[in-house]
């Protein structure tokens, strides 16, 4: 467990000596220093070697920068995994810690986009601060300066490989990026505070917990799971309902309604399930109402009704109630014939985008036959 501290000592004629406190350990036969530096200091002592690193992705930098600034503005802490560096022999052990040789640099192996985002966030905030000062908004300028100072003082956890060769650096970079695993969707749904749709889903789910069981951590629900739906599926439903998107959603929300009403509308959509689904609707052996593709198709159907019949979201959701009398929700119901596997007599492939669209079309046809004009 490293003791985290940093000292910088001026040295006449030979530049600045950076003293680092931490602890060393061996990993795969290589010596690694575990330490922590304030970002302002780290920024001054590392470089990017383009022979090792990939090209910076500006979109990724913007995404992380916006997350950082949003966290500051909302007063939330934010966390990053340790940055990985190569010292290339420039760090040596002393009696009271470690020292980076004056004029030397650390070379970043993992953390390039996060570091670039920190720098971009600081520049962005400085620009906003100057604008606030020039227009007399001094209170805002002071607040922005506190954000800038927080980023400069942000403690960056680091793993520094002390003696890698150039080829080992490239191998480490490749291994890290090849073996990297994104956070499990269940974790994202529970803890992500960057995505408005994820936050909306959590809020909506909290209001529905007394109505039906919601799987909190799994993205895919097995046939034996007693939950009717999951947070991950609910988010996809909400996006399909408001935007008609069945693939990955990018960018800010576009609700096609008053954003202040989005939560109420989403809650109403899920409440309709109680009225149209059969009893024991989470029984996937008997009914299809517990399958994600069917649930998303319902949301997509409501979205398509708003587009083709000039209905509001609430009016379209109300029209879904016609399905209570038109669908048994059993696997062999004619409405799901495009999904039925003749061997098992159960639906399959329900969550594929094309299948969701087909299921939604079947719902829409039935609703239109019940009174809506096509």
Image (cartoon, helix red, strand yellow):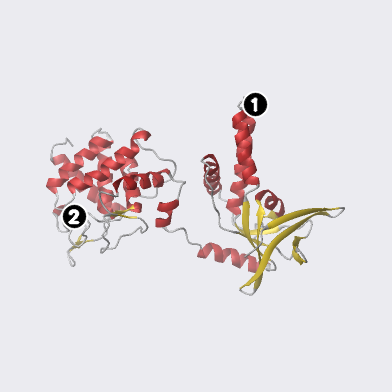
- Where disc 1 sits, the SS reads helix
Q: Position of residue 44 (x, y in %)?
A: 71, 51
Q: Position of residue 360 (x, y in %)?
A: 24, 47
Q: Is residue 25 above or below residue 296?
A: below
Q: Position of residue 73 (x, y in %)?
A: 53, 39
- What residue is drawn where x is 33% and y is 48%? 205
Labelled pair 1, 2 in contact (Cβ < 8 Å):
no
The quadrant of the rendering that contains the C terminus is: top left
Is residue 205 among the parts visible in the rendering? Answer: yes
- What residue is drawn where x is 35% and y is 48%? 235
**Which residue is situated farthest in the top direction here?**
136
Task: Indicate the quadrant where residue 2 lies.
Answer: bottom right
Disc 1 vs disc 2: which is toward the camera?
Answer: 1
Q: Front-most of 303 and 28? A: 28
- What residue is drawn where x is 78% and y is 60%? 101
The residue under label 2 is 336
Q: Is residue 295 left or right of residue 13?
A: left
The quadrant of the rendering that contains the N terminus is: bottom right
The residue under label 1 is 134
Earlier residue among tags 1 and 2: 1
Q: Is residue 74 left or right of residue 162?
A: left
Q: Is residue 373 left or right of residue 90?
A: left
- Where disc 2 sits, the SS reads helix
- What residue is drawn where x is 34% and y is 47%? 206
Dot 1: within a 10 Å radius of its alpha carbon, few (fewer than 14), some, or many (20 or more) residues?
few
Dot 2: within a 10 Å radius of its alpha carbon, few (fewer than 14), some, or many (20 or more) residues?
many
State the mark number for residue 98.
Answer: none
Q: Front-most of 115 and 159? A: 159
Q: Position of residue 49 (x, y in %)?
A: 67, 57
For marks 1 and 2, give the CA distance: 64 Å
Task: Indicate the quadrant where residue 45 lies.
Answer: bottom right
Is residue 355 among the parts visible in the rendering? Answer: no
């Amino acid at each position: 467990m490293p003791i985290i501290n940093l000292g910088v000592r001026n040295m006449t004629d030979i530049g600045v000596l950076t003293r680092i406190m931490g602890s060393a350990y061996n990993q795969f036969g290589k010596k690694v220093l575990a330490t922590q530096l304030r970002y302002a200091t780290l920024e001054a002592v590392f470089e990017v070697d383009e022979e090792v690193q990939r090209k910076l992705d500006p979109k990724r930098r913007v995404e992380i920068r916006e997350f950082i600034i949003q966290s500051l503005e909302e007063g939330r802490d934010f966390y990053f995994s340790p940055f990985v560096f190569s010292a290339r022999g420039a760090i040596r052990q002393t009696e009271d810690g470690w020292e980076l040789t004056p004029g030397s640099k650390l070379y970043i192996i993992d953390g390039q986009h996060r570091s670039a985002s920190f720098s971009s966030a600081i520049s962005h905030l400085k620009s906003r601060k100057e604008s606030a000062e020039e227009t007399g908004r001094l209170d805002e300028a002071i607040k922005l300066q506190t954000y800038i100072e927080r980023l400069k003082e942000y403690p960056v956890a680091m793993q520094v490989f002390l003696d890698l060769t150039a080829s080992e650096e490239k191998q480490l970079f490749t291994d890290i990026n090849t073996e990297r695993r994104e956070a499990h969707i269940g974790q994202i749904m529970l803890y992500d505070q960057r995505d408005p749709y994820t936050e909306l889903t959590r809020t909506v789910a909290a209001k529905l917990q007394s109505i039906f069981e919601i799987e909190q951590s799994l993205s895919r629900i097995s046939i034996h799971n007693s939950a009717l739906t999951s947070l991950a599926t609910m988010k996809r439903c909400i996006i399909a309902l408001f935007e008609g998107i069945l693939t990955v959603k990018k960018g800010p929300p576009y609700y096609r309604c008053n954003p202040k009403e989005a939560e109420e509308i989403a809650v109403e959509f899920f409440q309709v399930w109680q009225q149209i689904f059969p009893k024991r609707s989470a029984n996937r052996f008997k009914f299809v109402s517990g399958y994600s593709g069917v649930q998303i198709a319902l949301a997509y159907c409501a979205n398509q009704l708003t587009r083709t019949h000039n209905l509001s979201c609430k009016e379209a959701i109300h029209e879904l109630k016609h399905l209570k009398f038109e669908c048994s929700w059993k696997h062999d119901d004619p409405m799901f014939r495009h999904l039925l596997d003749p061997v098992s007599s159960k639906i399959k492939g329900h969550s594929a985008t094309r299948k969701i669209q087909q299921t939604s079309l079947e719902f829409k046809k039935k609703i239109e036959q019940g009174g809506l004009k096509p």
